[in-house]
Image: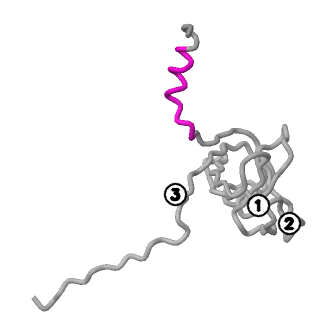
Amino acid sequence: MNLCSILLLFLLSFSTGNNLYTANGKASYYSDRMQGQRTSSGERYDKAKLTAAHSSLPFNTLVEVTNKANGKSVIVKINDRMPKSRHSIIDLSRAAAKEIDLIRAGVASVTIKEVKPEEKQQDVPFAVSEAKPDKTK
């Protein structure tokens, strides 16, 4: 083995192999006329759900989309395909676009980051019961 091969093996040994996807680019959102149409995953598009289209991420992948202009972010599920575009990297549902204040502008610079399912914020908080002190003592 030559020195370059040894160095390459050494560097590759530090790679975890489970790097999460991240990207920067422009985001746009679906028009309302898409409501009820089938997505590439077979689901029907619902403008009230937090979903998105991406050119290559697997269906059901969760990504956090952050609007660089205002720092607002939303977690969406990929359920549709879009063509590779030099103009945008993700197409958001209307509900997701509203969460990050994208509706008025129509397009925004965003950062998208894949989220592990266990990192997703829970939709409904856990019920918390308060223990009342025992007054019999």
Mark 1 or 3, closer to the camera? 3
* Mark identifier at residue 38: 2
Structural distance between the alpha carbons of marks 2 and 3:
28 Å
- Residue 75 seen: yes
Image marks 1 and 3: residues in contact by CB distance under 8 Å? no
Structural distance between the alpha carbons of marks 2 and 1:
13 Å
Q: Quadrant of residue 1?
A: top right
Q: Is residue 82 above or below residue 99?
A: above
* Mark identifier at residue 118: 3
- Residue 105 seen: no
Residue placed furthest toward the left: 137
Q: Amino acid at mark 2?
A: Arg
Quarter of the picture holding the C terminus: bottom left
Image marks 2 and 3: residues in contact by CB distance under 8 Å? no
Please tell me whether mark 1 sits on a helix, a strand or a loop.
loop
Q: Is residue 12 magenta?
A: yes
Please tell me whether mark 3 sits on a helix, a strand or a loop.
helix
